């Protein structure tokens, strides 16, 4: 919807990005241009877009996992080339850069209420924000034209799926869910990088009142959610700072607790995953399979090296202690292996 309301031509997106962003760009009918990550980070740098954008291009500025990009330099570089800046704050809702909210640096920003995000609803949802009155009016008109009201059947289906997801990812059944959905199927992630050829329900159904009713209490408790996430984040950061196998993302969230992932870089992602699983710790895979062409070697190198440690506000002290002990044990094993 958003891309249909913007002027210009190409859609320029990070090479290392969620397939949903690639999918939206593809479904808009515009040419998609992937931008390589020369700095080796999950976020693009100004050098990655210098001389790559054209006047009228739509540049998607992503704050991956909630870690803010170098906003000032990137925005200046994109504007100098005449690009329209669209901020992707799907993982950066409530984040900031130099005290200014992420999502306020471009013409428009979009966000997500997916299950992995700071505020989430069954099953997914999203929002668009802009301070441009003409664009806001165009977005509202486009929404009225494109979006359909959710049927009762679909509402019940989503509610049931949400309940099932909550149940199987709880401590009681998660082991069984993981074994059936991943271990027995010989995979560590459900991602496949395949893009939809036509808009599905996520693109055509309007956000329902019952979904808003689930999101509203989370928004009202946002400060508490961020505080709890910040407590977990600090423990993880302290455990990873001097870890030989784990290199945490250098870009720190300005407001601790607003990021939605705790990414670490490692030389052997699969081996690290198996080692942590053996210690009773399951990790998350994000963007392991990209829609980006394989010729974008650095983007794929990042995808092959980034693993997400468990990081969510409802982590119990026991879960956090298990993770901390696993990381400590791995560090001791590394040190012992290094002794001749």
Image (cartoon, rainbow, N blue to C red):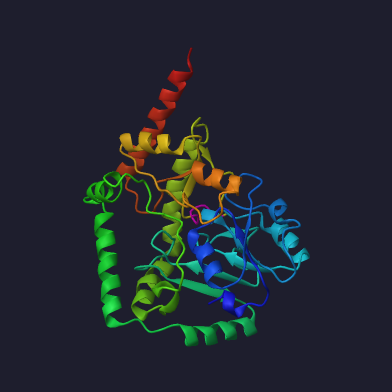
Residue 334 coordinates in the image, percent (x, y): 45, 24
Q: Residue at x 41, y 24 (%)?
A: 333
- Per the rendered image, the range of residues in magenta is 255-259
Give the residue at the far top of this rendering.
Answer: 340
SS majority, magenta: loop
Image label count: 0
Across and down, in percent, residue 70 comes to: 66, 54
Q: Which of the 4 image quarters holds residue 107?
A: bottom right
Q: Position of residue 72 (x, y in %)?
A: 70, 58
At x 41%, y 58%, the residue is 116
| Relative depth, front residue between 156 and 117 | 156
Residue at 51% across / 47% down in the picture?
Answer: 303
Establish if 310 lies above or below 86. above
Counting from the top left corner in percent of width and height, residue 87 is at: 60, 65
Relative to 9, 170 lies left or right: left
Do we see residue 279 in this rendering? Answer: no
Looking at this view, is 275 or 55 the one in front? 55
Judge whether residue 97 is colored magenta.
no
């Amino acid at each position: 919807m958003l891309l249909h309301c913007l002027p210009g031509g190409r859609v320029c997106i990070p090479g290392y990005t969620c397939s949903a962003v690639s999918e939206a760009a593809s479904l808009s009918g515009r040419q998609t241009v992937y931008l390589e990550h020369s700095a080796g980070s999950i976020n693009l740098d100004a050098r990655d877009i210098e001389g790559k954008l054209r006047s009228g291009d739509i540049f998607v500025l992503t704050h991956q996992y909630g870690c803010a990009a170098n906003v000032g330099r990137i925005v200046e570089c994109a504007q100098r080339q005449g690009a329209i800046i669209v901020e992707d704050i799907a993982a950066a809702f409530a984040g900031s850069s130099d005290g200014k909210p992420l999502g306020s640096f471009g013409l428009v920003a979009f966000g997500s209420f997916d299950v992995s995000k700071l505020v989430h609803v069954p099953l997914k949802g999203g929002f668009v924000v802009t301070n441009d009155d003409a664009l806001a009016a165009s977005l509202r008109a486009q929404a009225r034209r494109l979006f359909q009201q959710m049927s009762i059947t679909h509402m019940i289906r989503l509610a049931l799926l949400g309940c099932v997801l909550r149940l199987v990812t709880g401590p009681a059944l998660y082991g069984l869910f993981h074994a059936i959905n991943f271990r027995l199927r010989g995979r560590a992630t459900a991602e496949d990088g395949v893009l939809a050829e036509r808009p599905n329900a996520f693109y055509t159904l309007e956000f329902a009142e019952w979904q808003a009713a689930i999101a509203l209490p989370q928004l009202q408790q946002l400060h508490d959610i961020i505080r709890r996430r910040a407590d977990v984040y600090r423990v993880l950061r302290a455990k990873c700072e001097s870890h030989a196998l784990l290199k945490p993302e250098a870009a720190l969230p300005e407001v601790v607790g607003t990021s939605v992932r705790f990414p670490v870089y490692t030389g052997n992602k699969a081996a690290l995953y198996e080692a942590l699983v053996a210690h009773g710790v399951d990790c998350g895979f994000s963007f392991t399979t990209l829609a980006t062409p394989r010729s974008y070697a650095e983007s794929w190198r990042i995808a092959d090296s980034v693993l997400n440690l468990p990081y969510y506000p409802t982590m119990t002290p026991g879960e956090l202690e298990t993770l901390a002990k696993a990381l400590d044990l791995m560090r001791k094993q590394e040190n012992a292996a290094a002794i001749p």
